[in-house]
Amino acid sequence: MPCLFDPIGRSGRMFRKNDTRVNRPPGTRPLPITGDLPTFARDQFGFLPSLHRRFGDVAEWSMGSTRVAVFFHPHDVELVLAAAGADGPLGRGQEDTFARHAAITGNTGLILSEGVYWKRQRRTLQPGMHAKWIAGYAGIISSFSEATVLSWDAGQTRDLQRDMERLVGRIAMKTLLGSDLGDQLAERLKRASDRMLQLNMAEYALGSKLPTRVPTPLRYWLKRASTRMDRLIMDAVEHRLAARETQQVTVGPDMLDMLLDARDEEGQPLTRLQLRDEIYTLYLAGYETTANTLGIALTLLSRRPDLQQQLVDEAERATGGSELGYEHVGALELAEAVVKETLRLHPVVRALNHRVNTTFSAGGFAFGPGHLVWVAPCVTQRDPRWFDEPDEFRPERWLDGSTDTLPRFAWFPFGGGPRVCLGQRLAVVEMVLIMTTVLRRFVLSPAAGESADLSLRINGGGHLVCTNARVILGDRQETRNAEEKADHHA
Ligand code: HEM
């Protein structure tokens, strides 16, 4: 057992990079050079839970030659997340990846930045996520969702993961850039961003030991993908700037308006490069996470007709049968519970990764510069100490009082502390609106040949994605009429 109250951890002593002589958490015995990476790659889902089972609330493993301490207890999760602000001892985990990405592509958006620059950008962007703006985005979300379900027909078999990617991608473009760019352009942007994510992962895995000035084919492709993405985004920005000059803006308030109107503490607007970086960052951070969570939620619901009906009943009560809008979201408690439970069981961001800049202590251990520090929602959120029947999908746990006294960081799919997800409220509103819109129109059941259990994989960007999201659409009104008729006859 680790000594949880080890005084060394609190002494503030300075340590050398990856110093092995100090009191260390229990952990794996890694292979030379590759460390535990082969085991991690072989068992991506089982590796982190196995560390918790074998070693307890703090465990260490080796990513190549770098030691990684993983904290599983909510109290330590809180310490880690709180230490990750501009002046805290923890920096971005993929410091090298982000710095490399910035050096290769020139992009330094919020999620990629650190220190004083990050703080300034965060303050500048934060107002764009206030309720007034979210209400505006919700209008766009509702109308796109409505149009999408109207284009579907009962009896069809659909892959809801792909449908959600398409829908959320279009909504992201519309809420960010304002104009309906059409399926074709949204698709091109999606392809460009998928490619960027994959190339980034490859650069992280393969290029990390080479200085960024060394040209490699991978870096050439990364730069090219980034330039393509920039061009698509900048076209839209230029278009809006021109429209503003001639006062021909016809679209409602969107994030581009917010970004164009944003001022930093010195009253300065964002430069064009900053605009590009932030739009790109918001798109990348918000689109895939939301689409994948929706794909998972709807697939889970397709196995639960009872829950689907309860969600529809809740929506009918809230709207009185009228169109769904932002004003109803507060009353859709079960829908929000479904979203929370989906993010608990299947957090699309499975682990958060930080790097010690100076010294950091938690769980009775202390770490010096260069050490990696992780927290893992995918493990903590399934801990039976905090959740009864932790592997079961039970949205009602969020409504029956059993989660009221949870430790604060037993559930943290959006991270926490100073770098908590900027778009978390928007994401929840979006998922509640889309999910409810789909269910009000269609009964979902698994397509022929799909397994009853959820099938998941981790994609090139490191996010969770559902691979058996094919469902058959039944007409909800017809199903209801048939049920009422049967009840009547009975
Ligand atoms: C289900 C949906 C989402 C999930 C699970 C999610 C999760 C997360 C997590 C875990 C982080 C922290 C990452 C870290 O510290 O390394 C994060 C950061 C961030 N998220 Fe989200 N996110 C979601 C949707 C969104 C949306 C819709 C947007 C914006 C439109 C967004 C924008 C951001 C930004 C800008 C950051 C960086 C914040 C900073 O570094 O200060 N996210 N998100």
Image (cartoon, rainbow, N blue to C red):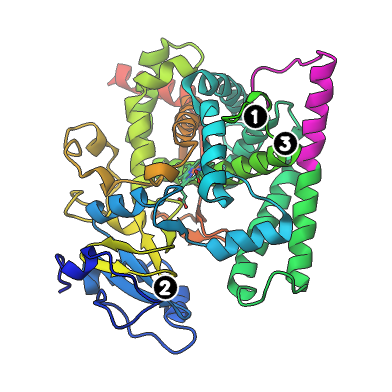
- Find residue 271 and name its label: 3
As helix, strand or loop, the secondary structure at mark 2 comes to: loop
Q: Of the residues shown, which amino acid type is indicated by label 3? A: Thr
What's the CA distance linking mark 2 and mark 3? 44 Å
**What residue is drawn where x is 33% and y is 65%?**
70
Of label 1 and label 2, which has the lower sequence position? 2
What's the CA distance linking mark 1 and mark 2? 42 Å
As helix, strand or loop, the secondary structure at mark 3 comes to: loop
Of label 2 and label 3, which has the lower sequence position? 2
Question: Label 2: how many residues lie within 10 Å, few (<14), some (14-19) or many (20+)?
Answer: few
Q: Residue furthest bottom?
A: 32
Q: Of the residues shown, which amino acid type is indicated by label 1? A: Leu
Quadrant into which the N terminus falls: bottom left
Pointer 3 residue Cβ closer than 8 Å to ligand 1: no
Q: Of the residues shown, which amino acid type is indicated by label 2? A: Asp
Return the x and y of residue 365 as percentages of the image width and height: 24, 68
**What residue is drawn where x is 47% and y is 37%?**
444
For disc 1, the marked residue is 259
As helix, strand or loop, the secondary structure at mark 1 comes to: helix
Q: Is residue 39 magenta?
A: no
Of the pair 155 and 290, the residue shown nearer to us: 290
- Identify whether 389 is placed above or below 335: below
Q: Which residues are magenta?
A: 232-257
**What residue is drawn where x is 39% and y is 24%?**
312
